[in-house]
Amino acid sequence: MKKKNEMPLLDHLSELRRRLIIVVVTNVGAAMIIFNFAGIVMEYLLAINPGMQLVYISPSELFLIYMNISFLAAFIVCSPITIYEIWAFVEKGLYKREKIYVLVSLLFGLICFAGGVYFCYRIVLPVTLQFFTRIAISEVKAMISVKSYTSFVNVMLLSFGIVFEMPVIVFMLTKLEILKPSFLQKYKGVMIVIIFIVAAIVTPPDVISQLMLAIPMVILLYLSIMISVVVDKMNKKRRKKEELELAA
């Protein structure tokens, strides 16, 4: 097995600073470019529920929204670069087998994040926003600010993107033998309660959006437990094989 690279602490800190600078500069530069196209991104967000009439209540509101959209879009667009810089920093301290696990987890993590964002954009948000539109009453005129709307949409998109990372995180932790499936199975009930609490915190204060986040999280939890069980069996087979090779 290949020995880990050894570097002085100051060299590690220097490299970490350099890679953080690259990530920050890349994201800020991308945000400045995307700002010129923020109106197009805004049109996609508004297209989720075209029947909703929005207003802005301060002169700077649209500008600040465009800034938020630009940085959020830059974060997503530059995520491959961010992942590469993370990988380039941590891979020097890993064994060959660990490098493969971390690299696979980073790549699938990016795919799962994109899948969560897409699932939220195409399915969850249209259903949630249409529900809000249907329960409106004629006696009360809706005055939804564009800031509130985009904040709601951005929180939902990011929440689902992060939630869909759960199977990848469980895979990596189990493969590195940090997490055991027995732990997940033992505290499954507690984690379901925590899931509903987290869904209530990260989503706007309404039951529909909370359920739309909590239910996929519970499904992903069960999927993660299955993945952890399979990976743990693979770990046991590998350890048994290594023991037989050493005994031979």
Image: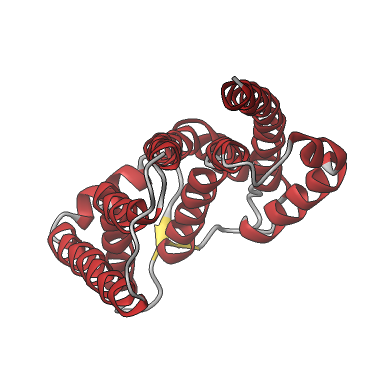
Answer with left or right where residue 12 lies relative to residue 175.
left
Residue lying at 76% horizontally and 55% vertically, measured from the top left: 197
Q: Residue at x 33, y 57 (%)?
A: 5
Which of the 4 quarters of the picture holds residue 132? top right
Percent across and percent down for residue 230 are 65, 22
Q: Name, please, the residue furthest toward the front.
A: 248
Q: Depth check: 147 or 135 in front?
A: 147
From where the camera sits, is residue 42 visible? no
**Can the viewer see residue 64 in this picture?**
yes
Residue 147 picture quarter: bottom left
Between 149 and 72, which is closer to the camera in this rendering? 72
Counting from the top left corner in percent of width and height, residue 211 is at 71, 41
Left or right of 59, for residue 36 = left
**Visual colour scheme:** secondary structure
28 to the left or right of 79:
left
Q: Position of residue 213 (x, y in %)?
A: 64, 42
Q: Is residue 36 above or below residue 137?
A: below
Q: Nearer the viewer, residue 60 or 21?
A: 21
Quarter of the rendering containing residue 223: top right
Figure check: 21 above or below 106: below
Name the spot of residue 74 as percent of width and height, x first. Answer: 26, 57
Looking at the image, residue 236 sits to the left or right of residue 88; the answer is right
Image quarter where the C terminus lies is: top right
Numbered circles on residues, count: 0
Q: Quadrant of the N terminus?
A: top left
